[in-house]
Amino acid sequence: MKHIKSNMKTVSYFIIICLLSGMINTTVAASTMKQPFFPEQSSPHEGINNSSCIGQSSDILQMIQQVNASILRAYVQKIQDFGPHPTGSDACEALGEYLYDTLSSFQVSVQYDSWHYKLRSGKNIVASLQGKESDNIVVVSAHYDSFSVSPGADDDGSGVAVVLAVADIMSHYTFNSTVRFVLFSGEEQGLLGSHEYVQNAYRKDERILGDLNLDGVGTAVTSDDGSKIKHHANNQSAWMVDISKTIASQYHEEIGLEVIGLPHVTFSDHESFVKYNYDASYFLEYNLTTFYHTPEDTIEHMNITYLANVCKLTVGTLATIAELNPCLSNDDLDVSIKGRALSHPFQFCVQIENKKSRIDSANVTITIAMKNLRTGQYVLMMIDTQNTTCNWTFTTEIKSLWEFKPMGRPTSNQIISFDVIVKGIKDDATLYTRQQTLGVIAAQSVFLFPKC
């Protein structure tokens, strides 16, 4: 009798899933969970030449040369003149109006983005430069609120000044991707404004390629400080650091900065993007100002020449990202997932085919996640003698075919969702494709649908 009940329970799983499989939308937005990264798995581009596929704007040098230190100084001075301007204060409201009017004087569209979060409220300011591929969005951001006692010249008048200058310069050019120049409030209270902005973007399923955040980029006391800039990023967003290093090297005579790539940090607005699984990175001055969060955070303690060099690096990096025009499109990647049809001990298989392998390889991260449909928790699978969470991310280059087969066996019967997300990096940053299905774990095997 016990054996019969067990078999009937397994059959019930199949019936439920087959009914549900026609009701689930397989293109829902990506998970907000952070994905851990396995060591990079890559191979060289043997016999592949994709240099013609990357749109390198011939005007980048021209844009860099338009950066004006006097204009940056004027922006920082104006921000400082508002005095301390924490979120919710009259000074912050007045500064926001000045920034809105300044951006409106450029050839970009501008709007307020009001938010309410954690019993606080404020306004973000969003300026947009429409791209030829409008679905792809590149963000450059800074925060315009200050610490309660600080006039906020470096933190973050410096970042705001760069965003304003870059918006003015780039507004005279056309790029493949839409560029958004975003100024957040609520940063000093816990990244509030950026949290609400990114959450809304996620809910609308916006295709944000990456956020380049600036927060404290105007102080350099020594010549060594003035020759370096920190660029923080997680593994997923490391391609942005690679681009900034390339720009710094290619235009070293104009920029004069060495980019120091460092791991991800969580204390500025780029973290809000990372939490929603968007790529994001953070420019930070090489040696943090000693006047951080004090009344002495004023322009007298800043180095405007250094700020101008950071601005040059920013416009070059941002323009390069916005100009990316890879050979491959989403339709060129075919994602297939299979369940118990495989022989023991393989329980499922993920294959990704590059249908244009003769033209270009695909530089991507691949996230594979299996969740319990009832609890939302990642499935634990017995591999060898250890329980392993079924939540993997790989960084790889796909020339023709990439295949993943886990060797192990599931340990408990359950209804599952199975998700595969492919995101492009480097020259393929505009790529994004997803395959999602349902299934059951029963009788020590994984069965996936609609192959039921």
Image (cartoon, rainbow, N blue to C red):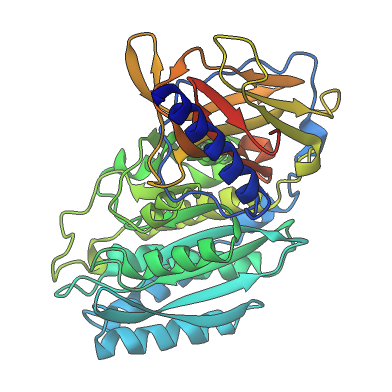
**What is the x, y in percent for residue 179?**
62, 63
Tell me: residue 20, above or below residue 2.
Answer: below
Q: Which is more toward the observer, 157 or 220?
A: 157
Q: Which is more toward the observer, 9 or 129?
A: 9
Q: Which is more toward the observer, 163 or 29?
A: 29
Q: Which is more toward the observer, 369 or 157?
A: 369
Which residue is located at x 32 percent, y 68 percent? 192
Which image quadrant for residue 53?
top right
Which residue is located at x 32 percent, y 15 percent? 386
Position of the N terminus, as image quadrant, is top left
Q: Is residue 143 visible?
A: no
**What is the x, y in percent for residue 278?**
50, 50
Tell me: residue 184, above or below residue 385.
Answer: below
**What is the x, y in percent for residue 341?**
67, 19
Position of the C terminus, as image quadrant, is top right
In the visual, does 300 lie left or right of 364?
A: left
Which residue is located at x 22 percent, y 75 percent? 151
Which image quadrant for residue 247?
top right
Q: Is residue 49 visible?
A: yes
**What is the x, y in percent for residue 334?**
76, 33
Tell me: residue 258, above or below residue 137.
Answer: above
In the visual, does 304 lie left or right of 327?
A: left
